Structure formats: structure tokens, C-alpha cells
Amino acid sequence: MIKLLYLILLAAAALFWPLYKGDVAFLLLAALIILPFLLAVQLAVTVRMFSAENENDHVTVFRNSEGEVGIRLINRSIFPLSCVKIRLRTVFMPTGEVSFHTVTVPVPARSSECVSVNVSSEHCGRTDIFVEYIRVSDIMGLFSWTLYRKKLSAAVHIIPRISERFSALAEYFLSLGGEAEGESGEKPKNGTPGDVCGFREFAPGDRLSLMHYKLSARFDKDIVKVLSVNNSSKYLLTADLSHGDLTVRDEVLCRLMSCAYYLNAGGAEVYAAVPAHSQCDGIYTENGLAAQYSDDASYFALAEVLCESSFEGIPEAYGFIMCDVGKEAE
């Protein structure tokens, strides 16, 4: 609209000067002709002294709560910016729902402004916020400059609250670790070597370290097989988060995080692994694959989704007590 008014005014001044041929008419026409060049120079100087940065890259909130991501716009020049347009794209995982938003704010000279984006969801997951571009315009909107095209992004991780309903399950898992380490005072008899026909699959709590299997008298030696737990208090929690029903998925994730929290509070070293499905992208990743927990239950992170449930990247990928926490959630 301003650009249209300028063109109308310029055309009127161009007609006014030949008719009156006065100094005022000439100065008005000259000013209108020079004005765009001055605005272009001013915008070029301002753009060189303009920057944008994330206030926070990652935010973790409980579901049904509001998380805020901020983008700081900084203008270090002596010229104000009357129109800074930001184009945002938000993607909610695991559904993949995409939405676009455009925000326009002024940024005074030698000052900064923060653009805040509020995110909330009734389901657990991750909302990625991408800055498609930042467009800076002069005061009349005659010229514009596009900056930071797809260079800034942030994520809001939506997690369930810790539930005491699963503290008993965590205590049960801890008891398995105690049995595996022989803390009960008597070594468990499950898995002790009998004969070759006694082979079976490993079950949590089995003591299978350095077991000797005498196959027959034809072999004048013993075969030593080293399996599993290795006197460790490391827990690998597994769960399937690929369920299409987001309510069921939320319950599984609540069980996973609650058990991990109470295991960590009990002094255990906790890791997590889930099958690699597109539905699993909502898990918060921090510091590699190790699950991180703080004393405050309101802020902590789960482990990275492992590709095809492999243990690649986990330190010493053996000696885990494996516990499936997703069986009873459906």
C-alpha cells in the first residue's frame, strides 16, 4: 500500500513540476527520486548490522503444558527497522502435522526484540520449529532483504509426568539386578550348568557368567561360554512406541520414563532402546545414547532412538539387564 502511494505521489510530482516550473516543484520531484536510493543505502547498512539467534534451542515441557521458544532479533545500527517479517514452519512428530506462521515486528535502533512461539500438545512428542526466512524491509517497503533462510531451528519436547504407579515396577527391576549381582546372599540357581539338553533362552535374573558345558567324553576339554549380565547394574529398557494410537503411545512413554527415573533414583545406570519407526521421533535426545536425569523430575531426557534396536554406540554393549516396559500398556 505504501509503495502504491509513493508511485502515485511520484507521478503527481512529475506532472506538477512541468506545469509550475517552480523551485518547490523541482525540489519535491528531486526528493522523491532520491528517496529510494537513500532507503536502499540505509537498508544495506542496517542489514550488515542485523543478526538473529535462538534464545533457546531445546525446551522440555509436560504434555498439556505450554512451552516457549524465543528468537532474538538484534539491530545494532542507528536506523530503526519498521518491518521485520519472520516466516516459521512447525512440524509436530510423530504425526508429521505441518503448519506455517508469519510474524511481523519492528526493531528499534540499537535495540533487540524477542519473537516468542508458544507450543502445547495433549500428546507426547516433539515440535520442531524452523525459521524459513527473515525478511527485512525499509520504512516504505520499497526494498527488502531476505536473511537466515532455513538456518535457525528449535525444538519443544513434550514429555509425560513421572507417575508413582510405576515405582513398584522399577523396584521389581532393581530386585532383578540384586539377584544378578548375588546381593540376596545366595546365587540364583537358574541357568546353572546341567547337561547339554538344559540349554534355554536367557531370562532376567539368570547368572550365566563363565558357565562350563561338558559336552561328552569324546572331547577332552571344557567349552566356556560367557553370557549376559556380567555383575552389572546397567539396565536397558525397551519399549515399542510405534503404536498408531497416540494415547497408547503416551502411556508406554510414561511407563518408560517413570521406570527409568525410579531406577536412576535407586542408583542404577539406565539406557533405553526402541524400534526405529517413524512414530518414535518424539523422544528427546541429549548427550548421545545415555539417558540423562536430574534430581528435579520436571526436567530430564530420554535416550536416543536406536537404529533398528541395535546397541551401536552404547558403551560396552553387553552386561545389560534387559527389561521390556511396554507390554502392559496396551
Image (cartoon, grey):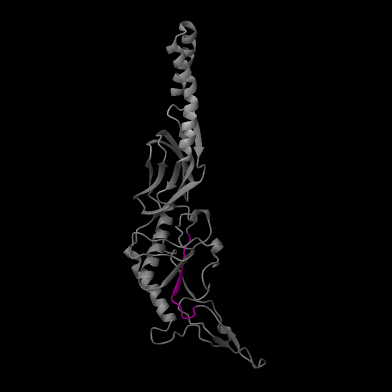
Residue farthest toward the right in the current orientation of the protein: 218
Q: Nearer the viewer, residue 16 or 215?
A: 16
- The quadrant of the image that shows the N terminus is top left
Q: Taking the image as drawn, is residue 127 in sight? A: no
Q: In the figure, 210 relative to 244: above or below? A: below
Residue at point 51% right, 44% down?
150
Give the image quarter of residue 107. top left
Q: Is residue 234 magenta?
A: yes
Q: In the figure, 166 relative to 82: above or below? A: below
Residue farthest toward the front in the current orientation of the protein: 23
Q: Percent x, y for residue 156?
A: 41, 51
Q: Taking the image as drawn, is residue 221 in sight? A: yes
Q: Is residue 7 magenta?
A: no
Residue range highlighted in magenta:
229-240
Q: What is the number of callouts on the image?
A: 0
Q: Percent x, y for residue 15?
A: 49, 10
Residue at point 37% right, 57% down?
160
Q: Nearer the viewer, residue 201 or 84?
A: 84
Q: Percent x, y for residue 79?
A: 41, 34
- The quadrant of the image that shows the C terminus is bottom left
Q: In the figure, 28 relative to 93: above or below? A: above
Q: Percent x, y for residue 18?
A: 50, 8
Q: Nearer the viewer, residue 227 or 202?
A: 227
